[in-house]
């Protein structure tokens, strides 16, 4: 079971490269997407949202944990940095026992509940001015056969 996801967001931290025991490269990074609702359409602030910088809208940031494998992992490790805007297409990971797709939940440094969704990237492209001039990475590959993502890498 999988769900295809398409995101455009900003990289929240520099990618972290690792290798599986058999030498397969894998890289992970966080990606932030933002949803905005105009105050004119919704004068009441939705729970957990905040006022936008210009004061004309409500906004909320959603964090995604992105994992890339093989050649795509090597390309990401070489060219992607914190703050870059990326287009990511992939599949949701983190299937619960009941078959639902759930976010990873943790407590932030400020004590508030936080959550992120896990994505296995298949395609990644640079967008925005920070990515101009960088070569577009090739289509990614699937994780190793038999690998089941349980929130941790297999090593």
Image (cartoon, rainbow, N blue to C red):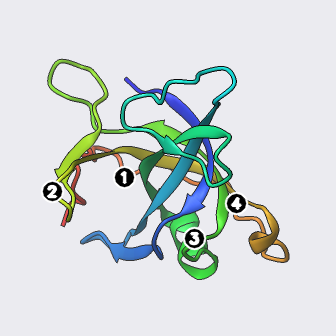
Of residues 74 and 39, the one drawn nearer to the viewer in this rendering: 39
At numbered mark 3, what does the secondary structure look like: helix, strand or loop? helix
* Mark 1 closeness class: few <14, some 14–19, many ≥20 residues within 10 Å: few
Q: Which residue is mark 4?
A: 138
Of residues 46 and 82, the one drawn nearer to the viewer in this rendering: 46
Q: Which mark is residue 65?
A: none
Image quadrant in which the N terminus is located:
top left
Question: Could you tell me which residue is drawn at 57 percent across and 77 percent down?
Answer: 81
Q: Which residue is mark 1?
A: 144
Q: Which residue is mark 3?
A: 76
**91 above or below 78?**
above
- For marks 1 and 3 on the same chain, the one whose residue lies earlier in the sequence: 3
Question: Could you tell me which residue is drawn at 40 percent across and 51 percent down?
Answer: 143
Q: How far from the left and from the top, in percent, is residue 120?
A: 45, 47
- Gap between marks 4 and 3 measured at Cα: 10 Å
Is the C-beta separation of discs 2 and 3 under 8 Å? no
Q: How far from the left and from the top, in percent, is residue 32?
A: 51, 54
Q: Which residue is mark 2?
A: 111
At numbered mark 4, what does the secondary structure look like: helix, strand or loop? loop
- For marks 4 and 1 on the same chain, the one whose residue lies earlier in the sequence: 4
Q: Nearer the viewer, mark 2 or mark 1?
A: 2
Q: How far from the left and from the top, in percent, is residue 92?
A: 42, 36
Q: Is residue 90 left or right of residue 63?
A: right
Image quadrant in which the C terminus is located:
bottom left
- For marks 4 and 2 on the same chain, the one whose residue lies earlier in the sequence: 2
Q: How far from the left and from the top, in percent, is residue 52?
A: 59, 48
Q: Is residue 67 left or right of residue 108?
A: right
**24 above or below 77?**
above
């Amino acid at each position: 079971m999988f769900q295809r996801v398409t995101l455009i967001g900003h990289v929240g931290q520099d990618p972290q490269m690792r290798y599986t025991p058999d030498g397969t490269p894998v890289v992970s990074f966080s990606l932030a997407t933002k949803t905005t609702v105009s105050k004119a359409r919704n004068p009441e602030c939705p729970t957990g949202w905040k006022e936008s910088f210009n004061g004309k809208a409500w906004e909320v940031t959603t964090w995604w944990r992105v994992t890339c494998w093989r050649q795509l992992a090597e390309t990401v490790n070489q060219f992607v940095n914190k703050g870059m805007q990326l287009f990511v297409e992939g599949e949701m990971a983190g299937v619960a026992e009941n078959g639902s797709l759930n976010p990873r939940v943790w407590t932030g440094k400020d004590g508030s509940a936080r959550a992120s969704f896990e994505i296995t990237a298949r395609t990644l492209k640079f967008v925005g001015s920070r990515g101009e001039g960088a070569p577009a990475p090739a289509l990614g590959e699937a994780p190793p056969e038999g690998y089941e993502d349980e929130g941790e890498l297999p090593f």
